[in-house]
Image: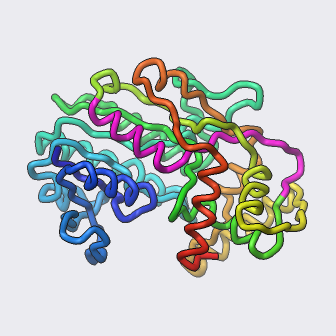
Amino acid sequence: MHVLVTGAAGFLGGALVRRLLASGHRVRGLARGALPPPPWGDALEWVRGDVTQAPTLGPALSGVDVVFHLAGIRRAPVRSAFFAVNAEGTRNVCDASWRSGVRRLVLAGSLAAVGPSRPERPHVEGDALQPEEWYGESKAEAERIAFQPRGNLEVTVARPPRILGPADRENLVFFKLIRRGLRLSIGGGPRPLSVVDVDDVVDFLLLLAERPEAVGEAFFCPGPETTTLEDIQDRGAAALGLHPRTLRVSPRVLQALAGLADVVSRTTARHLPLNRKLAKQLLAPAWTCSGEKAAARLGWRPRVPLQDSIARSATWYQAEGWL
C-alpha cells in the first residue's frame, strides 16, 4: 500500500516507518520544516506539510491509500497549543484525506483521552471520554473530530497507554534519574499503570490499517503486564546494573515543582521534562486499560514482555549517549 505517516520523525512514527519499509510498502513522511536527514536512504519520501496548515496537506496525500496520523504534541505551556495541533490538526488531516480519496485513516489516540482509571478496574472502550488535563482533552476532541462522517473515508483509532522502547523521550527522565543514583517514589501509591512496547503498538497500527472490523472503532492496546512507576524504575536500574537510593516526594511538593516548571517553560519557551500535565498523570490513582476488545475482535495480543521492553530502552539510551 501507499501510505502517509504524519509524525514520521517521532518515536512511534520512526518505528512504524521502519516496519512499513521492511514490508515493502511505499512510504511518505510529512515534514513540517526542513526535511529531516534520510535515515532510511531514498526509500522514505519526505514531503513538506504542516497539520495545522490545511492548504499544505494536499501534495502529501496525493495517491495515498492509508494515512497513519501520529503527529501531535505532548508538552505545551498553554491549553490552546494542544488543541491547535492535536485536535484541529486532526480535523485538517481528516478533511484533506477525504478530499484526496484516501481509503483509511488510522489515528494514534491515547488512553489520556479517557482519563485515569480506578485501581481495581481498567478502562474499557465503552467508558466515557473524561480526560483530566489539556493533553487528554485535545486527544478526546481529536477522536470526536476523526469519527465525524466524511464520505468513504474509513477511520479507526488506537489508544495506547504509556509507550516504552528505544528512542522514547517521555520515559527518559526516569532513566536519567536512575543514572544519577535516584529512584523517584511519590507518596500515596502504588498507582497501577498500563504500558506497552513500541513494537507492539506498530503491530497494532498495521492491523488497524487492514482489518474491516476496525473501521469506526477505537481500541486500547496495553502490554502484557500492569506495572507502577516505581516498578519501571526498579527494572530500569536492574537493566543498568545500578542501585539508586529512593527519593520520596509528596504530591504537594510534586505539584509545586510542576507549577514552577510551567512558569519557566512559558518565560523561556523551553519544554521542561516536568510540567503540570505530567504531575497530574503521575498523581492519578491509576492509568490502566483492557486489551480484551482488541483480542476478541482483531486477534491482537502484545508480544514484548515488560522487562524486555525496559532493557531494550536502557541499552539503546546507553548506546546513543542519552544517559
When asked about the image quadrant of residue 254, the answer is bottom right
Q: Residue at x 82, y 63 (%)?
A: 183
**Would you say residue 88 is visible in this rendering?**
yes
Side of 233 relative to 249 (left or right)? left
For this orientation, the residue located farthest to the left is: 63
Q: Position of residue 72 (x, y in %)?
A: 42, 56
Q: Position of residue 138 (x, y in %)?
A: 48, 47
Side of 290 relative to 177 (left or right)? left
Q: Nearer the viewer, residue 280 or 201?
A: 201
Q: Position of residue 159 (x, y in %)?
A: 49, 38
Side of 145 relative to 229 (left or right)? left
What color scheme is it?
rainbow
| Range of residues picked out in magenta | 185-210
Q: Residue at x 41, y 46 (%)?
A: 202
Q: Residue at x 25, y 60 (%)?
A: 29
When asked about the image quadrant of residue 43, the answer is bottom left
